[in-house]
Image: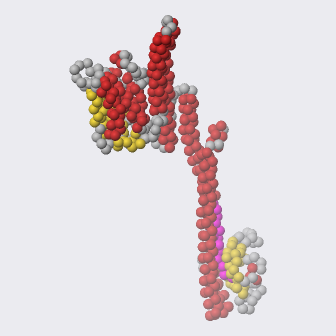
């Protein structure tokens, strides 16, 4: 009963009831239309046949008078399937014909009408009951004689009964089939919806790995489940990123904050002097600036991974953008003694977020310049910024000839706050490559770390259409 109660409250039930009503009314209209027009057609055929009979009998009367007319009617009334004929004298006594009984007074009113009657050969078990019906026309002949010509309408009545039965059965079958179809569809729909609701409850209590099952039919419920699962994947990814950020902040920022506190505490413990306080304050400001940069980087990564990058996607010429980035970093590279080369053919247009991609390239160039200076041999430090097309993709490459990154660590360095041993002595927070990876993902691309033999080559692989995540 509870299941039926739920079914009755569903939208599918209301829709099914509406469709059943519509189809029942449509069936009523169609059958009624057919019945009405068929009745009209049969009536018109009867009238035409009666008119034809009357025209023939009138011709016989004109040729041979009443005697000939009576003879013709007597002959015709004996044929199988004959029409109705009757001739009476002025007193109402039957002279010829096949009609045995009529309603009283019918022959006194000339004209056409529908009436009950009995044939001469009808059963006499109920003599007072006229059980047959016909369409008749009454004429008054000279001398007070009466003539009746008609057609039995039993076929029309049978057809009417057939139509009425068809209507009742069609309405009944429409209702039964509609209810059966509604119950079947509603049960399936409720089953799928209950599955979604059950999985949603599991997810709400913390099971973020739960996903909505697919029936494999490819119907609208499967498409909805796929969209919901994609949304759940994204939510799980964002929550996991939030958890990682929280953990990273708790662990990796604890050290600089502790160092900041110890520096201030040390300045207070030592012998007070203006120079000592100034040095402590300057170091504190520098440490604070580094913390602010770290938090800014974390916020930018979070915004990019959340799919809400600052600024709109625009169509840009890659050569022009790389030239602008190179103009900013050429003095930095020159000061570090690093050769900086830019190779970007003109005419490569890609849809991207200029600010984010520019920041990603700036991070890569900054790292490349910083580590290219540590070549470890006599070769000249070199950083190369290049762009090229590969099918429907744009490859932005930053290469250096520094120490590179071991293959085993190339995936790990894309995580937040990861710094390899050779980087511990250099300034930085370990968020640069994480930001680059987030920017690539937000544009529907990827980042690849490859061996430059020697050094490192970082490839930012983006779709030319600028598809986002």
Question: Quarter of the image containing the N terminus?
Answer: top right
Magenta region: 148-165
Residue 23 position (above or below residue 99): above
Question: Quarter of the image containing the C terminus?
Answer: top left
Q: Taking 372 as reference, is 14 left or right?
A: right
Where is residue 402? Give x, y as percent: 28, 23
Residue 180 among magenta residues: no
Question: In the displayed image of the protein, which residue is found farthest to the front?
Answer: 274
Where is residue 228? Give x, y as percent: 50, 37
x 29%, y 38%: residue? 344
Where is residue 157? Give x, y as percent: 65, 68
Q: Nearer the viewer, residue 376 or 442?
A: 376
Residue 262 visible in the displayed image: no
x 62%, y 52%: residue? 18
* Quadrant in the picture for residue 115: bottom right
Colour scheme in the image? secondary structure
x 43%, y 41%: residue? 313
Where is residue 285? Give x, y as percent: 47, 19
Q: Nearer the viewer, residue 468 or 53?
A: 468
x 62%, y 90%: residue? 59
* Quadrant in the picture for residue 190: top right
State the predominant SS element of the stretch in magenta.
helix
Residue 294 position (above or below residue 94): above
């Amino acid at each position: 009963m509870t299941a039926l109660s739920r079914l009755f409250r569903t939208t599918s039930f209301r829709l099914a009831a509406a469709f059943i009503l519509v189809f029942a009314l449509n069936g009523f209209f169609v059958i009624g239309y057919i019945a009405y027009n068929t009745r009209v057609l049969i009536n018109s055929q009867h009238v035409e046949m009666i008119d034809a009979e009357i025209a023939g009998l009138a011709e016989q009367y004109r040729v041979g008078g009443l005697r000939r007319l009576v003879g013709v009617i007597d002959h015709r009334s004996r044929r199988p399937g004959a029409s109705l004929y009757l001739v009476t004298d002025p007193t109402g006594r039957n002279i010829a014909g096949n009609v045995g009984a009529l309603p009283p007074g019918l022959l006194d009113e000339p004209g056409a009408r529908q009436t009950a009657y009995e044939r001469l050969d009808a059963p006499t078990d109920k003599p007072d009951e006229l059980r047959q019906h016909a369409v008749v026309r009454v004429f008054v002949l000279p001398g007070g004689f009466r003539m009746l010509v008609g057609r039995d309408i039993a076929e029309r009545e049978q057809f009417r009964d057939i139509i009425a039965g068809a209507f009742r059965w069609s309405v009944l079958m429409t209702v039964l089939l509609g209810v059966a179809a509604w119950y079947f569809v509603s049960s399936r729909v409720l089953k799928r919806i209950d599955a979604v609701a059950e999985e949603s409850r599991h997810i709400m209590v913390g099971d973020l790995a739960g996903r909505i099952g697919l029936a494999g039919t490819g119907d609208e419920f499967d498409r909805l489940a796929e969209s919901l699962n994609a949304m759940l994947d994204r939510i799980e990814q964002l929550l996991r990123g939030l958890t990682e950020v929280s953990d990273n902040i708790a662990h990796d920022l604890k050290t600089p904050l502790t160092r900041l506190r110890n520096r201030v505490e040390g300045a207070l413990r030592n012998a007070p002097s203006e120079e000592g306080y100034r040095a402590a304050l300057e170091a504190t400001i520098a440490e604070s600036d580094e913390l602010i940069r770290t938090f800014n980087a974390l916020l930018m990564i979070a915004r990019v991974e959340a799919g809400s990058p600052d600024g709109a996607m625009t169509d840009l010429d890659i050569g022009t953008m790389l030239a602008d980035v190179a103009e900013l970093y050429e003095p930095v590279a020159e000061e570090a003694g690093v050769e900086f080369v830019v190779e970007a053919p003109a005419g490569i247009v890609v849809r991207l977020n200029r600010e984010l991609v520019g920041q990603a390239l700036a991070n890569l160039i900054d790292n490349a310049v910083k580590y290219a200076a540590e070549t470890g041999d006599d070769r000249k430090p070199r950083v190369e910024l290049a762009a090229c097309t590969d099918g429907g993709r744009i490859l932005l490459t930053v290469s250096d000839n520094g120490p590179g990154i071991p293959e085993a660590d190339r995936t790990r360095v894309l995580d937040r706050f990861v710094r390899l041993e050779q980087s511990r002595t250099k300034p930085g927070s370990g968020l640069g490559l994480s930001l680059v990876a987030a920017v690539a993902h937000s544009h529907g691309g990827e980042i690849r770390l490859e061996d430059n033999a020697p050094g490192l080559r970082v490839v930012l692989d983006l779709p030319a259409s600028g598809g986002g995540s």
